[in-house]
Amino acid sequence: MIYLSGFHAIEERIKSSLPIRSLLVAKPGPRAREIIKLAQEHKIQINRTGTAELDRLCADHRGILLETEEEKTEGGHISKLEDFINNLGEQKEVLVVILDEITDPHNYGAILRSCDQFGVDMVITRKRRTAKYAEVIANTSAGASAWVTAIETANLSRAIEILKDNGFWIYGADMEGEHVFTKDLKGRTAIILGGEGSGLSRILKENCDAIIAIPSKGKLDSLNVSVAAGVLLYEVIRQRAKKN
């Protein structure tokens, strides 16, 4: 069972089609009462309970908690990825983000928020085993985790092969790469972001068509991975908007 406490996270989960068990309510304030109304409109079960019970389930709550089902992976990641590609048809402008060992749930949530804002079609990540961090991810992403299509896999190299076979260009983000502004990021594009501190793994680097970097004038080594994600994704939509 997973419990969401952030107002934005709860709202977006209710609006999405993802599974929900119930909304637990103790002493809601004005903002929480708005969410209760939204839950009623979506026919979500509402259970009245005491503050002590909410405290037991989640220390950081504001009078309400959303009780959700842990999502299950059906059929394995490869079938999901192939279904995604089959559904693209002849679509030429597609953007995929691949996350290689992103371990901080706050970073993961922030990246999902950027993915939602910049129209990423799919996020592929290593099996992160962070179900216990689902609330942190949902809150940090301001609810974007309810909307961004994502799959997990233990074999990113195989996922990259499938993308390449279907017309995707693969770009790895690394501070030693070529300036991102010199690359054509239109068409079917996948951007790989490496883990905090470790960066891109050697195997994934070797599978990239090119390595890209964000030009910097700072004295620090690099940007935080979630900040870098936002910059790179903005450059993609900038180029595509310019094309149109």
Image: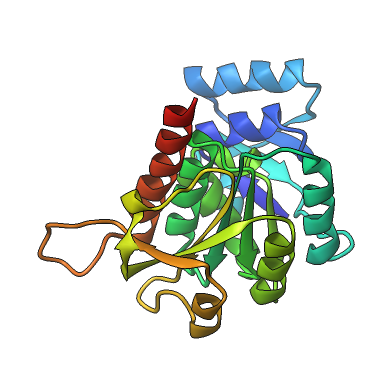
Kindly give the residue lying farthest to the bottom in the view shown: 202
Task: Specify the color scheme.
Answer: rainbow
Q: Where is residue 225 shown, x and y percent of the image?
A: 37, 60
Choose top left, top right, bottom left or bottom right for residue 168: bottom right
Question: What residue is rendered at 84% in x and 51% in y?
Answer: 83
User: Relative to 119, does residue 42 appear above or below in the rendering?
Assistant: above
Q: Where is residue 5 shown, x and y percent of the image?
A: 55, 41
User: Relative to 214, does residue 94 appear above or below in the rendering?
Assistant: above
Q: Quadrant of the N terminus?
A: bottom right
Q: How many marks?
A: 0
Q: Where is residue 238 shown, x and y percent of the image?
A: 40, 35
Of 203 and 79, nearer the camera is 203
| Left or right side of 31 for 169 | right
Of 214 and 41, nearer the camera is 214
Question: What residue is rendered at 49% in x and 76% in y?
Answer: 205
Asked if residue 171 shows in the view, the reply is yes
Q: Where is residue 159 shown, x and y percent of the image?
A: 70, 67
Question: What residue is rendered at 73% in x and 45% in y?
Answer: 68
Question: What residue is rendered at 55% in x and 46% in y?
Answer: 138
Asked if residue 60 shows in the view, the reply is no
Of 4 and 230, nearer the camera is 230
User: Relative to 206, does residue 237 appear above or below in the rendering?
Assistant: above
Of 223 and 232, nearer the camera is 232
Kindly give the residue lying farthest to the right in the view shown: 75
